Structure formats: C-alpha cells, structure tokens
Image (tube, rainbow, N blue to C red):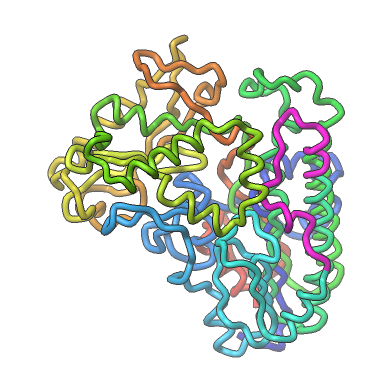
Amino acid sequence: MNNNRPSVLAIGIDAAESTLVRQMIDQGELSSLRSLLAAGRWLEVRSPSTIGSGAVWPTFLTGEEPATHGIYSEWKWLPETMSLRRYEGHHLTPFWKTWAKNGVSVGVFDVPFAPPVGVTKGFEVCEWWAHDSTAAGLRANPEPVRSLVAEATAHPLSANRFFNSTPESKSNLKELAAACSDGARLRAALVQRLIKQTSPQVSLVVFPELHHSGHQLWHTVAPDHRVYNALESNGDSTDRGSLLRDVYRAVDQQIGALVDSVSRHTTVMVFALHGMRPSLGFPAFLGPLLVERGFSALESWRLQSWTGRALSLFAATKRRAPTGLKKLYYQVTPITATYKLARPTMLPAYDWSKTRAFSLPTDQYGWIRINLIGRESQGIVPPDEYDALCTELEHMLVSLASEEGELLVQEVRRTAADAAAARVNPLPDLVVHWRDAAFSSSLKLKGSRVQAQMVSRKSTGQHTTPGFCIYRGNGEWGRDGVVDAKDLSRLIAASL
C-alpha cells in the first residue's frame, strides 16, 4: 500500500434494507446516497445472514466464512461443556490489524463484534454506542483519542440501551426515532473530529442506528403487512409512517457530512451486510416442539440438582413475568449483570443421554444442533446416523402447519455437508427459516399441544438478505454487480 495515494472512507449503515434505500433514493429522500450512486455503482452484498445476523460482521471483519470464525450469535454453543458462552471476540482478527502493523494509518469506529487491536496511528473506538454490545464497554486507542472521545457528548441511547417501547407506544417510538437520529448526528461529528485530528489513510465507521430503529419501527414503513394485523395501532399509523424514514434521512445527511469532510479524491463506499423485513417478535416454540416429538428430553425434576432446580425456577419466572416487570428489570439491572444472569437460563435442563437434537436460543431463525458423538461431550448420535436424523428433522419441520393449514417453515438449511464436516462445525446444524404465518399472534400448531409462544414482540423488524454497497472509486471488484461480505475488505484494499 502506498500512503501517498488517496484514502478510503468506508461507511457501514448496519441492517439498512436495500429495497427501502433504493425506493428513497428514487424518491429523492436520500440526497447523499443519490449523489454517491450517480458517481459510482450499486453492488449486491452476499452475506451469511441466512445463518443468522450474528454471523455477518465477523465474516466482514475476518474475511472468513462462519464455519471458520465460528460466530453466528451473541451466544456461542460450547460442545465440550454442553453450555453457552457470551460472545467476547478475543479470537477474531480484524483485517485492519495487519494494515496497522504495516504502518498504515487506520481509523475504525464502532464496527460491530470487532475487538480492539491496539491502533497507534489513526484511531479505533469500540462501543461508543452499539446495538450489538459485547458487554466489554467503551474502548478507544490511542491515548489522545480516548481523551477526545471522553470529551464528546454521549449517545442519547447510552443510558438506555434497552429502549422500552412497543409497536403501540407512540410517544416512546417517536422518542426512539429522535434518539437514533440525534445519535447519528453526534456519531458523525465525533468521527469528523477524529479524522481531522489523526488523518487516517483508511477510515471505517458504522452507524448502528438504522439497525436498532429498524427492529422496533419497521411496522411504520409496512403497516399493511399481514403480520401486523393484530396490532392495536394498525390502521392508526399515518402519524407514525415517517418515523423510520426520518432515521434513514438523518443517517443519509450525516453520510453527506462525512463525505464532504474528506477529499473529493477519497474512495467512498457505503454498505449494509443485510437488511430488514416485517415480523412481530419471533417464534420460540422450537425447543418444546423437539421435546414433544421425541428429539429432545428434559431432566426430571427429581434428578435435577438443587442448583438446576433453582435455575429452572428462575427461567420460568422470567418467561412468565409481566411485560412491565421485564421492562423494569432491564432498566435497573446493569447490562453485564443481565448477561451473567441470562447465561445459565438460556437452555432448559436437558437429559443429554436421551437428547438427539436440541434447539439453541436465537433472535430470528430456528437453530437446531445435533447431539453428535465425537463433537458434543455428551453426544449420543453416531456419525453414520447424522444425515438420516437431519433428514427426519427436515421432513418434520417443512410439514409443520397452523390449525388453519398454513405451512410455517419456508426452508431448512444445513450448515454441514455431511457428518465429517459436522464434526468440526461450530454452527447450528439446521437453520429454520419461518414463513409469515409463523409470526401470527394467534398461532396454534396443528397436531401439537405445544403453545406457539412468541417472544420479543416489540421487534417488528427482522433481518433479511441481501445487503448492498454503493461504491465510488476505481477499485476493480464486483464487475458482475455482486460482492461477498468476506471480500469487502479486498475491495477496500483494491481502492488504496
């Protein structure tokens, strides 16, 4: 790399939906992106979002596939202990670490899931405010940057990461939109100051505000979608219809400010690794269904330890707690404490000697892990039965229907080709993609006594694929109009 060549400004707008972006560009609502597109080109970004949203940023920052870096969620399954661990990212190596070691001045701001690498020339700021927090808190390098960040105005959501709103809470939703818009402004102002002070050759900044607001405001851009039929506010959304668009416009304005603050020769790319679609919470009945169908088995109360019984009671209490009490819990409990309290209750007390397959906790798709001998420490499924068991599960899932006869599963994807690949696979073995019918608040499963529980009903948006990239520069990449998320770092390098 030649430090005398023009620099690169890469801007991530996390979970911005490509179809909405194109629509707003065409309607003249996103003038900054429209100008960039007029001078550049549109690329489709393929990412592993079909596995889970937690896989996309680790894939981007390492340049590796999920089966290699092993991250697909904020929680990671540990087959050696048959338990879960909170993601901390220590084993990941961001692509800019090598650049920094080679003397390239690098500026990095709030890349989700990215650990600090000790940048000395330029700046790195982790979790100034993040939608996907690693619970490590704010970190910044080098020392002068820490001082600049400490002096800056805090993000409006810093004191309330769990913004308590529901689709019906008009005032809270307006406050959320305003906080995300103001946060984007403060973020851009701080980044501009850091760029001016440190003059990095490569700057990479991410706006998580669209991700955060998209989850809770998607019904304001698609109020007529069938999954929102049960909302009390459905049909009274005209006064809220611009809320999420307001946040998109606010972020677009800050993108324009960042672009205007650098040289006109600077290569600029604005990208999203995945998008958003309608939902209303997410199905949480897969675990009990696997128990009912004989794939999983729970430990009897008599055989559980006193600690196990206490955790089971705590988990049941949390599930059944009124919404207001849950809101209070997240308001008064420090985030590090909520993660520590959550970890032991994320899975029920399985009887591993009788469990062939089990559901992992998720915030979007259904995830199923096979209790495989030679991989799980308490595995019972022989490798030569792996494929047959996956097929059995697939057949059960694709035939799953509501009492009205609507199919609930769009598709089931395998993450390992065979048992040999599965032996070293850190991912869920099966990923279940739901149809819209699975999000119905009145859902009842045909031929099952399992309650079709929905959780996180404040989330009216869930992730979808693909992402996109608007690229203004001379780098030779994506001539077919498509670029993989793991190759975006190569596009940045090709632009230097």
Q: Which residue lies furthest to the top in this view?
A: 404
The residue shown at (70%, 73%) is 203
Q: Identify the image quadrant of the N terminus.
A: bottom right
Q: Is the magenta stretch mostly helix, strand or loop?
A: loop
Q: In this view, does 406 lie above or below 240?
A: above
From the top left corner, tell me how far across and down residue 236 is, in percent.
Answer: 81, 21
* Residue 211, above or below 190: above
- Specify whether residue 113 is in view: yes
Which region of the structure is painted magenta?
153-176
Q: Is 403 left or right of 12, judged from the image as shown?
A: left
From this view, report whether residue 477 is shown above or below residue 156.
Answer: below
Occupied quadrant, residue 240: top right
Q: Does the magenta stretch include residue 157?
A: yes
User: How many numbered discs, if any?
Assistant: 0
Q: Quadrant of the C terminus?
A: bottom right
Q: Where is residue 351 in the image (x, y as percent from the top left)?
A: 23, 40
- Whole-percent x, y for residue 464 in the image: 57, 41
Say which residue appears at 19% left-offset and 36% top-offset: 388
